[in-house]
Image (cartoon, rainbow, N blue to C red):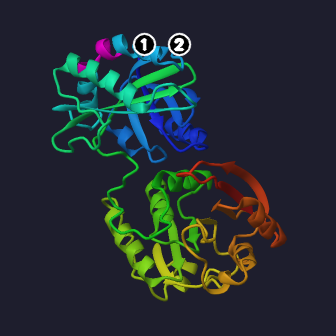
Amino acid sequence: MGVRLLARTLRGMEEVCAQEITARGLGTVERLRHREVWFTSDEPDARLLDLRTADDVFLVAAVIRGVGHTKADLARFTQPSRTAPWRRLLRLRGRCGGPATANRIDVVASYVGKRNYNRYDIEDTVGEQAAAALGLPHHSRRDGAVPDDGQPFPIRVTVEGTEAALAVRLTERPLHRRAYKQESVPGTLHPPLAAAMALLAGLSPGDRVLDPSCGTGTLLIESRLTVGGLRTLGTDHNPAALAAAVANATAAQPPGDTAMAQPPGDTAMAWAVGDTAMAWAVADAGRLPVADGRADRVLSNPPWGLQVAPGGTLATRPAAYYEELRRVLKPGTGRAVLLLHDPETHLSLARAAGLRVQDSRPVSLFGSHPAVVTLSG
């Protein structure tokens, strides 16, 4: 019998995460829930830690059914929390690349819908029972922050409908906190969402991939970590953001990758003829320094004022953005995958520029509800 796991992801990206799990041979997908992909693996290992579209990956400890909305239903958590195979999961965690030891219990709970109890009630019920089973201390979050020293045994509890899941996170640090993100600016993109956008773009080795408003480079970095052999160009009107992108790209460079992250400058034309594998340039997204039809893919989180105000041409004429995408995309096969925070308004501009909408996927992103949109020329 295989080991049951679940991957947490952004709402709206569950199917993309499931596709990555299947494509990479990490397990057999069983089902999707709110922000969760459940799957099984006969031999889980450290490859799970490189699941790029997941916010986190967990070993399933127990499934509790019949959980209602009253405080009396908290009792349903007691026995499963005491009898779950915590010690076995601790060993499995070590086999999957996480710590195989712990000195305290750390529980985080979340639920969908209204209930007559809160997350702290769930966390304390589960934490006290797991602490008794493992002989480790548990500190309630009810009165504030818990100790952050030592090695936690991180238990995640999710409740949807009448079903609850108890699970153990593989690592101390959530997977979405990428080690390469040493530099950041307002509006920087959530890395698992960037990875999902890269998968939706259908990248292939040798593709020329452009981000006209690249910020600190997350989309292009995740693209390069997903598919090898890409020729990428990131442009932005902010030189400081580009400097941060170069720093992040250098930190993310995998062993054996000889494509150097060139400093920002007049590198766009070199990229256009294929001489530079990773290039950056200060540029106006409404007047891109790229020849017609040179981009196989465009991936971008355009600056439409949610966290970053549009600059240059886009400040007065946002339609120029979509006109430039239409111009630089390769005729017939070119594709753009964009994160749009006001999709209806911007899709009308895209259509007016001659772009066709191939797909639109609403996502929930830290309180906002943008859409990941795929366009073609």
Nearest the viewer among 101 and 140 is 140
Nearest the viewer among 182 and 132 is 132
**Which quarter shows the N terminus?**
top left
Q: Position of residue 233 (x, y in %)?
A: 52, 74
Q: Position of residue 306 (x, y in %)?
A: 59, 67
Q: What secondary structure prevails in the magenta region?
A: helix
The magenta stretch spans residue 82: yes
Contact flag, marks 1 and 2 (Cβ < 8 Å): yes
**Mark 1 to mark 2 CA distance (whole Å):** 8 Å
**Region in magenta:** 81-88
Kindly identify the residue that appears in the image at 26 percent across and 21 percent down: 128
Marked residue nearer the N-terminal end (1 or 2):
2
Nearest the viewer among 60 and 104 is 104
Kindly identify the residue that appears in the image at 82 percent across and 70 percent down: 354
Q: Is residue 47 above or below residue 168?
A: below
Disc 2 target residue? 66
Q: Is residue 377 above or below residue 115?
A: below
- 304 to the left or right of 244: right
**Which quarter shows the C terminus?**
bottom right
Kindly identify the residue that appears in the image at 54 percent across and 37 percent down: 35
Indicate the secondary structure of the residue bearing disc 1. Answer: helix
- 371 to the left or right of 165: right
- Using the image, tell me which numbered label, if any, was put on residue 76: 1
